[in-house]
Amino acid sequence: MKFKLNLFIEQSDLKLNHMDKTVLIGSCFSTEIAAKLSGSGFSVVSNPFGTLFHPEAIFNVIHAAITDDIDVEVKRSDDVFHSWDSSGGVFKMSESELVNEIVKRRKELKQSLLSAKTMIITFGSAWGYIHNDSSMLVGNCHKEHQGKFTKSLSSIVEMEKMWSSLIQLLTELNPELQLIFTVSPVRHKKDGLIENNRSKARLIELVHRMVESTSAKYFPAYEVLVDELRDYRFYSEDLVHPSSAAVDFIWDKFEQAHCSGETISLSQEVKKIKASESHKALYLNSNADVKMKAQVLESKRELLKKHPYLNF
């Protein structure tokens, strides 16, 4: 008797390699996958402007980086300064410091995109908050009063037009850059479950339109959690984010689709060494502990001799 549906994901012709850099941007699910890649020895750049959910907010930071934009929309809260296009984790204690920091991150992102082989973009919500004074869809409201924003569900046509132009710019910047789109399986319960489903439906249609019209790929992270796992035991205590077991399951599916057998084997070697490095000995600095650390260090040295590009 079968107790669950299995989602078959075809092998992709877009394969990740430890020698290549991967840029990840978007929702908190991007951060989860970035951690998995980094822990497996890949070189990654993850969410340089913090967690962003809306396709237009993600578009804004990438477009600003590509076009060398130096204008920064600043928001001040007492003595703390934020940028309207970035998450709350990006802040400084003066406007000039913040502007310099944002511009620096834009330049770094552009350099990363010039040299990266793959970019993974995760959309989280089609609900956006438009600042009434600037008419800008913000990346984060920074706890500002909601009366200063207009909440809007973006249309598929508007988002597709925006992203089609951005994909063209990315292709001109780096013709070798390959894109993977995902839709975050995280529920945005503050919008309401019905509203969340409307939002996810638009995002799924959006990415499929772009995949059909470009060389971009789609990885069904949303479908794996919602359709294959489909059980609240695969969610964290807030009932909206995937549990660590679910993230591991989705990562395994991603790895099988976008990594060769050789790449997966090399990732396993890296993870084994990293696990040994983080192991806490029962008797610190004992003969056994010193011997084990020496063995781990030697294994790491040998692996880096064969693969000097690994991210340790």
Image: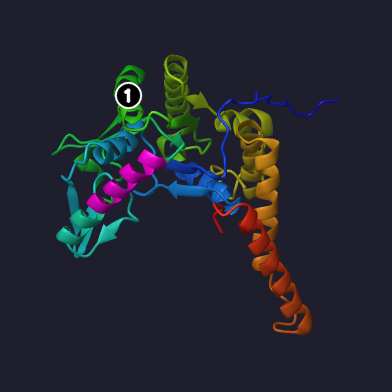
Residue at the limit of the structure toward the bottom, as seen here: 286
Q: In the visual, does 113 lie left or right of 28?
A: left
* Residue depicted at 58% across the width and 43% down the height: 242
The residue closer to the viewer here, 298 or 4, is: 298
Residue 220, given in percent of the width and then of the height, sits at 57, 28
Q: Main secondary structure of the magenta part?
A: helix
Give above or below for 180 relative to 267: above
Residue 67 occupies quadrant: top left
Residue visible at 66% across and 57% down in the picture = 303
Give the position of the C terminus as an image quadrant: bottom right
Is residue 89 left or right of 188 when viewed as pictured? left
The residues colored magenta run 102-115
Q: Position of residue 228 (x, y in %)?
A: 67, 30
Residue 275 relative to residue 107: left or right: right
Query: 239 above or below 258?
Result: below
Would you name the residue on which mark 1 appears?
A: 168
Compared with 300, 38 (above or below) is above
In the shown orientation, is residue 12 left or right of residue 125? Answer: right
